[in-house]
Amino acid sequence: MRFIVTTDRLSAFDRVLSAVPFKGQVLNELSAFWFRATADIVAHHLVSVPDPNCAIVKEASPLPIEVIVRGYITGVTSTALWRRYELGERTIYGQHFPEGMRKNERLPHPIMTPTTKGGPTGHDERLEPREVVEKGYLGAAIWNRVQDAAFALFARGTERAAQAGLILVDTKYEFGLAADGSLLLIDEVHTPDSSRFWLASSYGERFEAGLEPESRDKEFVRLFYAEKGYRGDGEPPELSDSVWA
């Protein structure tokens, strides 16, 4: 078993930037909810939550890939779909994107955009789904299981979010192998740290008006830094009072 403490640290662009009171509790308890709500899809590492910020979990060997499922073209980080599209790319993660797409537009269907867990630069590096096997990160059998689980998890998250008036825009999953070789969902699930959520009620109107959706995640922090020209390299600007408010 392993004892995990979820802190209040705030990170973006692969950098720890600040701390937010009670953030760790929110993430830990949300993850516990989602681990239990998706246990019929894939086994997870959670054993118990003895404290709002703490979890006891099964030991697992993490897979070397972060599995991101996306339902919309958005984002300002170097691995985000919209950022790559904005820079002129039309084949991203092995998927073709037509001309004329707009930021925050819904995709015809969810896609998978895997990354490594921090390359030589310290930042996550993009992979096409086929490259996970071709470059030797995972065997074909385990990668197929991971992909099936990730898409099923995203479908469940989308359904439950819609019931709460939210859109699950995209999210990151991490998996590991237990001692017996079985696949486990680990880390966190459908939290505001690992996912983007938008208010469904105002999305359509704001999209047509060219406005950013009303988010319920930490995208506003990423947008603040992106507007300052910061994307993870060098010393980050200090967060302004308006962001905290």
Image (cartoon, grey):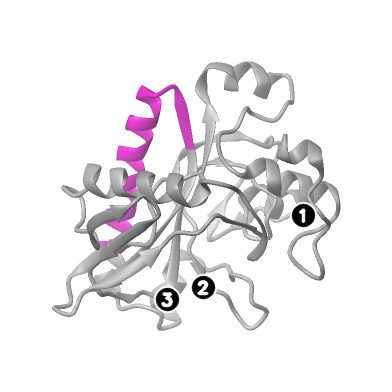
Q: Which residues are magenta?
A: 145-168
Name the secondary structure under disc 1.
Answer: loop
The picture places residue 82, in percent across and down from the top left corner, at 67, 47
- Mark 2 and mark 3: Cα distance apart in space: 6 Å
* Residue tagged 1: 87
Residue visible at 62% across and 27% down in the picture = 214
* Residue tagged 3: 64
Q: Are marks 2 and 3 in contact (CB under 8 Å)?
A: yes
Q: Nearer the viewer, residue 68 or 238?
A: 238
Q: Nearer the viewer, residue 108 or 6?
A: 6
Give the amino acid type for the residue marked by disc 2 in the picture.
Lys
Q: Is residue 169 left or right of residue 124?
A: left
In this orientation, does residue 71 appear? yes
Image quadrant of residue 183? bottom left
The circle on residue 222 is: none
Bin the neighbour count of mark 2 within 10 Å (Cα to Cα): few under 14, some 14-19, many 20 and up: some
State which tag comes first along the sequence, 1 or 2.
1
Name the secondary structure under disc 2.
Answer: loop
- Mark 1 and mark 2: Cα distance apart in space: 23 Å
Residue visible at 73% across and 64% down in the picture = 232
* Residue tagged 2: 117
Residue visible at 57% across and 47% down in the picture = 21
Q: Nearer the viewer, residue 33 or 71?
A: 33
Would you say the magenta stretch is mainly helix, strand or loop?
helix
Q: Is residue 44 left or right of residue 175?
A: left
Bin the neighbour count of mark 1 within 10 Å (Cα to Cα): few under 14, some 14-19, many 20 and up: few
Give the amino acid type for the residue marked by disc 3 in the picture.
Pro
The picture places residue 192, in percent across and down from the top left corner, at 50, 44
